[in-house]
Image (tube, helix red, strand yellow):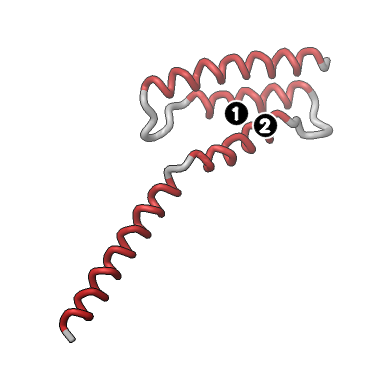
Amino acid sequence: MKKPLQKVIVFSLLGLFQLGLAASAAEASPLHLTNRLDQQQSYQAAPQGTNQQERERLENERHQREMKRRPNESDREWEKRQKQEIQRHQDELRQIGAAR
């Protein structure tokens, strides 16, 4: 009776260990980046009925938020994201200016 009980306990613990590994791998997967891309796309669609000054103000506020360093972000990632954000911000301001 002792052997089967030990086997059940060992296999149960192995199953829990595998479940824990799978959960951490799923959490670290790049699938979460799709949510971030959706957020960026939502900024590109300007709200209807707003004037250019309001759009510029909203873009500048968004730009300031994006330029801040995020928790647990390395220097290299932050600098890369800053360069991309500066380019995106300049493009957006040009687009707003062209709509005048």
Q: Does residue 19 appear left or right of residue 9 in this picture?
A: right
Q: Quadrant of residue 19?
A: bottom left
Disc 1 and disc 2 in contact, CB within 8 angstroms = yes
Which residue occupies 60% across, 27% down? 61
Which residue occupies 28% across, 63% down? 14
Spatial CA distance of label 1 from label 2 is: 8 Å
Three-letter residue code for mark 2: Tyr
Which residue occupies 26% across, 75% down? 8
Which quadrant of the rendered structure holds the N terminus?
bottom left
Three-letter residue code for mark 1: Arg
Which quadrant of the rendered structure holds the C terminus?
top right
Q: Nearer the viewer, residue 69 or 29?
A: 29
Q: Quadrant of residue 51?
A: top right
Residue 2: x, y in percent? 16, 83
Residue 76: x, y in percent? 39, 20
Q: Does residue 52 appear left or right of residue 18 in this picture?
A: right
Q: Nearer the viewer, residue 66 or 51?
A: 66
Residue 9: x, y in percent? 24, 73
49 to 84, vertically: above or below: below
Residue 35: x, y in percent? 58, 41
Label 1 secondary element: helix
First in sequence: mark 1 or mark 2? 2
- Residue 25's tag is none
Q: Which residue is mark 2?
A: 43
Label 2 secondary element: helix
Q: Does residue 28 appear left or right of residue 51 in this picture?
A: left
- Residue 62's tag is 1
